[in-house]
Structures are given as C-alpha cells and as structure tokens.
Image (cartoon, coloured by chain):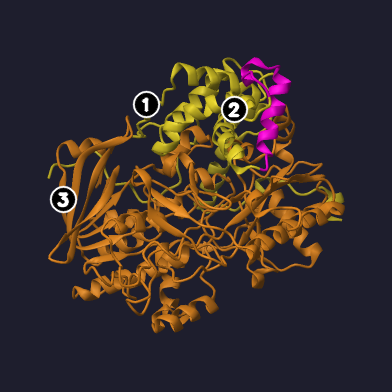
Amino acid sequence: MILGYPDYAREQRFEADVVVVGTGAGGAVVGSELAQAGFRVTFVEEGGWHPTQTFSAYTSESVPRLYRDGGGTVILGKPPIPYVEGRCVGGSTVINGGMAYRAPDPILAGWARDTGAEELSSKGLEPYFEQVEARVSARQQRAESVGADNKIMREGSRRMGWNYSENPRNQQECVGSNNCVLGCPTGAKQSTLVTFMPTAMAAGARCLTEVRIDRLIIEGGRCVGVAGHAIDPVRMRRGVAVEVRANAVVIACGAIQTPHLLLKHKLSRQSGQLGRNFLCHPNVKLIGLFPFDVKAWQGVSQVGQVREFHDEGIVLAENFIPPAAMATQLPMIGTKSWEVMQRYNQSIVGGCLVEDSTTGRVRRGPFDMATATYNVTAHDHERFLKGARLLAEMWFAMGAEEVLLPFISLPSIRSADELGRIDPSRIRMSEVELFTPHLMGTARMGGRAEDSVIDVSGELWDLPGCHVADASIFPTAIGVNPQITIMAMAMQIAGRIAEKRGLAAPKAA
Amino acid sequence: MAESVHPAPAVAATPAVAPAAAPVPGDRFVRAQAETLSAGSRRAFRALVPLICPVADGPDFPATIDRVEGYVLGQLVYMNPVIRWAFGPLCRLVDWSPLWRLRGLRPLRMLPPAKATAHLAAMMHSRWALVRNVLYPVKALMLAGYYDQPEVHTAMHYEPVPFIRSRVSFRGRLMAGEAARPDDALMDLPEEVTR
C-alpha cells in the first residue's frame, strides 16, 4: 500500500514493527528484508512514488518529480560543490548512473581492522554482495547498448595504453536509452523502485510518501518512532503532522539528511562524529567537441571507467547529461552557448572523480536547513588538474577539436599542445567548478562509541532502537560508486535487527 | 485503517507507454504552483533572458521568454527557501551589476545587447567568487529553461522521445526472448578514428 498527501487528511498516526525513513539503496533494502522476515514495515519517503512509465527526457518533468530541491543543492566551501540527491521512492538509485561496484578489498580490510569487526571485511560482506548483485542484476552491458561516446573512451584508453574496466551495472537487458539521470524509461535499470520496493510491498509493507520526518520520538531513552509533516504538493509547504511509532527505527535519508535529522537530538556526543567525516568524491566535468557525430544520448551512460590511475585516487569516465544540464556547465552564454549546443551531437561529457583526501561536515544551518561544508585540499586540486589533462589528452588523441574545461581562468583548449596550461600555478583552487553525486560518512560505523556514531549492527551507540542504513555509515570513502556497498551493508543491518528481535533474516532467494 | 486510493506498484515490467512530455495516464504527480516574482524582479528577469539565452540567434519559437520564465518559476518552487527567496533580488542585482561593479550607471537592460552580454560573460569569468556566484543561479536556470524546450532539441537534432520509444520496443523483444537484430546496434566511430 502506498499513501500520498491526500491520505493524511484521514489518518496521521501509524504503527509498525519497523519504520524505515528513506527508500533508496539503504532504506529499501532494510525494509524489504525485514518485511520478508515477517515484520510489519512502514516506509516513510519525503518524495513521491513515480513509476517507470512517468519518466521523461525533459528536465521540466523529471527534476521536480525525482530530485531534491529541484536539483539546486550545493555543498558550501572553497570551491562550492553542487550535488544531486534523489527525492522519490527509490531515492538516488532512480537517478544514478547505475554503476554496481563493490567497495575495494583494501578499503573493507581497513574497515574490519579499524572497527574490529570481521563482518565488514570483503569475506564478511561477501554473501550480502552476492545477494544484492543477484537481486539488482549487476552485470556488464550488452554490445547493442554501447554508443559512440563510450567507444571513444574504450578505444582512447586502448590507444593510450590505459587500464579500462567495463562497469558492472544494475540492469536487466539495458538497451542504452540513456535517460538514467532522469529515470530509466524502459525499466531496465534495477533501482530500488523496481526491485526491493515492490518486494517489500508484496510482503505487506506500506509506504508513506510525501512526508518529511523532522524529529525522532524518544521515550525513556529509547527511540520509539519518528514524526514529521505531510508535504502539500501544490504549495510545497508543511501540511498535517504525521507520526509513525515502531519498535525499531531505521534512518536512511542519505549522508546529508540523516545527520541533519539526528543532530536535532544532539546525539553522538561522546564521539562528536555525527555530521563529521563528510566524504563526497568530488568530480570535475569536461566537454569534448569532436568533428564527427557521437550522439552520446544514444547508448548507455558510462559503460566503463579508466582505472589506470586508481592508485592515485583518480578515475576517469564518461557521463551523459541532457541539454538543459549541459548548458549550465558551459563557460559561455548567449549566442556563444548556441554555437556549442548546436554541436551537442558531436560532444562528450566526461569526468574525473577524485577520492577524498579530506573530510567536511554537515550541520543544521540557518532556517533549519541541512548545510554541508567541504574544502578541497591542494592534493585534490592537483589531482583534478591531472585528471582533466589526462582526459583531454585522450580525447585529442581520438580527434577532439576542442575541450571545454571547468576552470574559470581557462575555459577551453584546442589542442594537446595546450595541456601544459592546465597547471596548479595557473589555475586557483577557488576557480575550479566541481560536482558530486556521492555523499558518505556522516554517521560512521565503528567499533567504539568514542570514535563513531553507530555500532556494527547499525544502532546508534547512544540511542537504542535507532539505526542508520545509508551511505552515511561508511567509515571512509570507497573510491567507487557506492550503491552496492550501501545495499550490502543495509542487508547485513537488517539481519542484525531481525536477530535482536528473535527472528531470522530471510535466506537468499 | 481505510484502504488507500493508492495501490502498491506491480513488480516491474517493460512499460507499455513510451515516455513523453505529455502526462501519463495514472500519473498521480501534482505539480506545485509556480513561484512568482515581484514586478521589479520580473522586469529584470525578462530583460536578462535574451542576454543569457540565444533568443536572437538561436532557434526561433513562439513566446520564448514566456516559456523560459514558465520553466524557471516552475522549477524554482521546488528549490530550497533561500534560493526561492533570493532569486528575484538576484535578478535585480545582476541587472544593476554595471553599477556595483563600477562599470557604468545604467542597468544591463538599458545597454546595447552585445555590450550587456559581454558584461555578463565577464562576470562569469570574474576572479571574485562572489561576482560569479551572484550570476550563477540566474544563468543556470535560464539556460536550463531554454535548452529544455522541444524546439531547441529539434534544432540540435536531439530526438530523445522517438529514440527512447525505439529502445523500449527493443527491450520488449529481448524480454520476450528474442535475439537482438543488426539494426539494434548503435552508431560506430568513423573509420579514420579507429584506424
């Protein structure tokens, strides 16, 4: 059963065994597992339920349905970093690119070592990774879904002698319609909207959509529910109060909204870690212009990644974005923007992802808004520039005529001879335009209350009954797309919750 | 508890209807009331659109400025309260930027278009982050609004709707157990690139 705003005129108080706030990679998995184990599960989702058939190639239709704050979210800092979050049933899994990587073994080994919890090692998480990957059909793309832009990346990597890795993606017969960031219109992308959520519903769960939770219900030192307001979809304002009482509460709102909610109650004082350790895999985006048609909108986004420089924390990849989004990235306006956009079919958008070398913080800011801050380091800055040089070099080797750059003082270059201009001595840190879709670390899992927010079962050290199951639990950045790791850890947490209450977690299908 | 009018979704299946800009039957999405601007902010906004978007030289379609305004105000209502509140004043601030940047006494809307656009381009590349950040939300929303228009897509030879429709059909065949056909493959690179 799915409820929406009109339903709350009739009923505002609900009860469940487990309430899960958020329906993305973490929340949907936890709720689905527990519903299948026999728990009465109620999801609370701030966004709406938008099925596959409603997904559109137009940002005017898709962004209001699927994105938090109309896509206008930004991490403050030097420089500021725009980011995106899903705000819909399925969360960010509905709008992500669908890469399905496990966290690398060395990362997990570090987590296990630092927490003293072997279950966080690659061996400990192996059964959960396998279940998740089977459930979301993580596999490489079929040949017919690969477009010319990805062929440029693949052939360019070969020509440069670089390690190119084909991505596993959560997809079932993906045919490369390339509308990932606005919702997969074919149903191929196996987001939680089309996988774990239907399973949860079939197992008796219900989903309260268009409700924003703004506080926990705490009684006798234990979390016994959540409370918030319905959101009037016409006026975008708070409506009636809604609350859900439950024996167990799972917060899975993402690495910015989760700490924002928990900080209201001044939790995790012993470690002071709540909201800290904010990690975000900052990206720079480049646009390559070629003398021939590429039609990057035909064919799946990001078939593979250049992993040659992964040891340095640099990953290069292609990313399709629709015209409305690409136009906002251009270093020009007016007629000059049209001169570039007319060449949309001859363009590739690519990016350089850099693994975090620092951390930021999420706070409750002015007007009670979630405020994230993050300042890149000189080391990050050097890697952004190196990644941009490498990607531009490859594109020029593949025939690019011009590469538009994310640098205020150097908006474009027209040949490989100009690569030397992409240099830290010429480009200041504050003049780099960054972006990120990956947000992590702000309710870190750990082995001790002194240095973490939650224990390895996912429960807050200082608030029994309250669990977290989203990317905010990562102790460190993982350097790869996070959704599979989120799902695997969420599945593990679901098992712990079930065990605590004397029920077994569901077996693998 | 009374039954909700909203049934649970079926397990995912290949959609029968291709996506389009038109509403899909059964879609319960309710669009929010668009944001409004004060008279002065609206005057500044509408003056800035032809400076930031290629209204004069780009694809010609009816009521361009109205359409961009409709997009921007329709998206703005979903943004956080700070952006919603600040957008109108930012438009006025940008319009009067020649004054506070000590470049002149007249607002942009009273300058020759080429000069006004050059001034805005200089703001985009200013070494001062505050100057760039004043312009960025205005520029980004206007350009997004312009380049989301179907007529502009047609002029760019960007045709996502029929392409997606063809891909929905292709996936339907695969899900029914058929093999891919040669014409299901997407474009190759030119020979001179792969040689």
- Circle 3: residue type: Phe
Q: Is residue A108 above or below residue A13?
A: below
Query: Which residue in the protein does label 2 denote?
Result: B146
Q: Quadrant of residue A314?
A: bottom right
Question: Is the C-beta separation of discs 1 and 2 under 8 Å?
Answer: no
* Chain ID of residue with mark 1: B
Q: Taking the image as drawn, is residue B57 in sight? A: no
Question: Do labels 2 and 3 touch, CB within 8 Å?
Answer: no
Residue A390 on image: x %, y %:
75, 60
Describe residue A91's horizontal placement relative to residue A56 as left or right: left
Q: Can you identify the residue that label 1 sits on?
A: B33
Q: Which residue is mark 3?
A: A14
The quadrant holding residue A466 is bottom left
How packed mark 3 is, by other alpha carbons closer than 10 Å (few <14, some 14-19, many 20 or more), is some
At numbered mark 3, what does the secondary structure look like: helix, strand or loop?
strand
Percent coordinates x, y for residue A481 in the rendering: 53, 62
Q: Colour of chain B?
A: yellow
Say which amino acid is labelled 2. Answer: Tyr
Spatial CA distance of label 3 from label 1 is 30 Å
Figure quadrant of the C terminus of chain A: bottom left
Q: Is residue A182 left or right of residue A274?
A: right
Question: Which residue type carries mark 1?
Answer: Gln
Magenta residues (range): B104-127
